[in-house]
Amino acid sequence: MYIGLDLGTSGVRALLVAPDGRVLHSAEAPVAVTHPHPGWSEQHPAGWIAAAAQTLRALAGIAPAEMAGLRGISLSGQMHGATLLDAEGQVLRPCILWNDTRSHAQAARLDAAPRVRDISGNIVFPGFTAPKLAWLAEHEPDIFDRTATVLLPKDYLTFWLTGQRVTDMSDAAGTAWLDVGGRCWSDDLLAQSGMRADQMPRLLEGTGTVGPVRGDLAAELGIPDTTLVIAGGADNAVAACGVGALGEGDGFVSLGTSGVLLAARDGFAPRPESAVHTFCHAVPDRWYQMGVILAATDSLNWLSRITGQDPATLTAGLGPHAQAPGALRFLPYLSGERTPHNDSSIRGAFINLDIAQEPQDLARAVIEGVSFALRDNLEALKSTGARLDRLLAIGGGTRSRYWVDLLANLLDLPIDLPQQGEFGAALGAARLAICGVTGADPAEVMTKPPLSETIAPRAELRAACDDAYAAYAATYPALKALS
């Protein structure tokens, strides 16, 4: 048996799978986020351990016989978080998370430094790990001076499980310290933020073996002490493993709290100025690129909160088939934006509000605005040479068929909807565990899910969608000028 352990921003999910990849059981536990100041976002790693232990004990209680045959655990996790350990392995402060923007000035400075983009293949965004350490050097120098190792969030769980300070290529690629093409730490990049190679965890591919679970902890959790921990990967890379997006032409669109448009790549082809992320994949010798928007379903949840109507009520009257985009326009920059603008200060807006409009009209405009932003991402990906033949749609927003139909038309790509079932990061992590323990070929294990439906773009909407997108794309500079 194998376990995929996924550390998200809001909780931990553990998935128990059979050797053939069938999902047997799952367990979840929440984790809390704190916001000590505006723009700050933190979690204490002790909360991750408590949640992970809770899920593993739950599986041991549900399926003791299966857990007795556990061979491997692999991990997926939220990216970019700075988890700081001293020389004894003690946590020095709460982890600074991916959506923390306090280090925007340090990010801009690092991004402007010579060769940083060339080596890392990316813009240095405020959410990345390197600018967080540069911020600490300036604002919490005592913590900075005591930092012996910087771990990414999932890798702290690996440290808890094994005592080993290890990370994988896909997660390391989001630090702005990795030579992403060469798949190794860069002394030049480390030096830019005052860091050293000895403060970095050991690098493995996502299928690499870290080591066995510590004997005392294995007994406490009710799992064999022969269970191997496999390195795993960053959440989106591992989600790509869960849906079989490994090679050129494969990709997915994720409508979650944030929005992601991901394209798997066979080689390293960065274009940092596009604000597309170019990262190592969680499987060896492959990469992926993605555009990220910071508020996807979060935009609809925001509208729900201010109108007092839940998202299902707001969208109930839209039906299953998209219309041509309307005149009411929403700019979904509620928390700033990554791709393609790299703008942490821009904020959202409605344009062309009319006294006759109702909450459903606002909901339609929000869905259109998020979809336009994902079209921005597609155009940015195309500029790197990425090829997408079709997309798999995942995430909570895909429960709205209207939204998926609109995306198919705005992106002018067929969009596949998977059948109900398990896929994504927890399953991808379990698949990495299978490959790491058995040596199986990822291409044979990481297959695509069965589909319930493919939604094709409609030719009669193409011109209207292109015209509406052109108008949307012209709105950002005008909004920026007013900000």
Image (cartoon, rainbow, N blue to C red):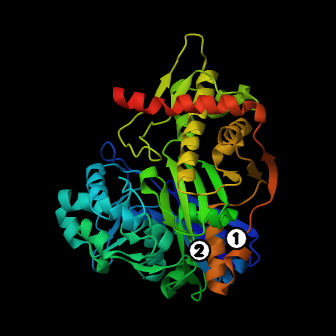
468 above or below 282?
above
Q: Residues within 10 Å of mark 1 (few under 14, many from 20)?
A: many
Residue 38 spot, x, y in % from top left: 32, 42
* Amino acid type of the residue tagged 2 in the rendering: Val
The answer to whether residue 324 is visible is yes
Judge by depth and name the residue closer to the eye, 181 or 449: 181
- Which of the 4 image quadrants contains residue 251? bottom right
Tell me which residue sits at (42%, 67%) in the image: 152
Judge by depth and name the residue closer to the eye, 464 or 343: 464
Q: Indicate left or right for 105 with 118 as reference.
A: left
- Which numbered dot is residue 446? 1
Judge by depth and name the residue closer to the eye, 108 or 345: 108
Tags 2 and 1 in contact by the CB under 8 Å rule? yes
The answer to whether residue 320 is visible is no
Residue 226 spot, x, y in % from top left: 59, 89
Marker count (numbered): 2
Q: Residues within 10 Å of mark 2 (few under 14, many from 20)?
A: many
- Which of the 4 image quadrants contains residue 200? bottom left
- Which of the 4 image quadrants contains residue 427? bottom right
Tell me which residue sits at (30%, 49%) in the image: 104
Tell me which residue sits at (70%, 70%) in the image: 446
* Amino acid type of the residue tagged 1 in the rendering: Met
Residue at disc 2, secondary structure: loop
Residue 108 spot, x, y in % from top left: 29, 52
Residue at the spot of label 2: 283
Quarter of the rendering occupied by the N terminus: bottom right
Mark 1 or mark 2, which is nearer the start of the sequence? 2
Q: Indicate left or right for 58 with 93 as reference.
A: right
- Which numbered dot is residue 355? none
Quarter of the rendering occupied by the C terminus: top left
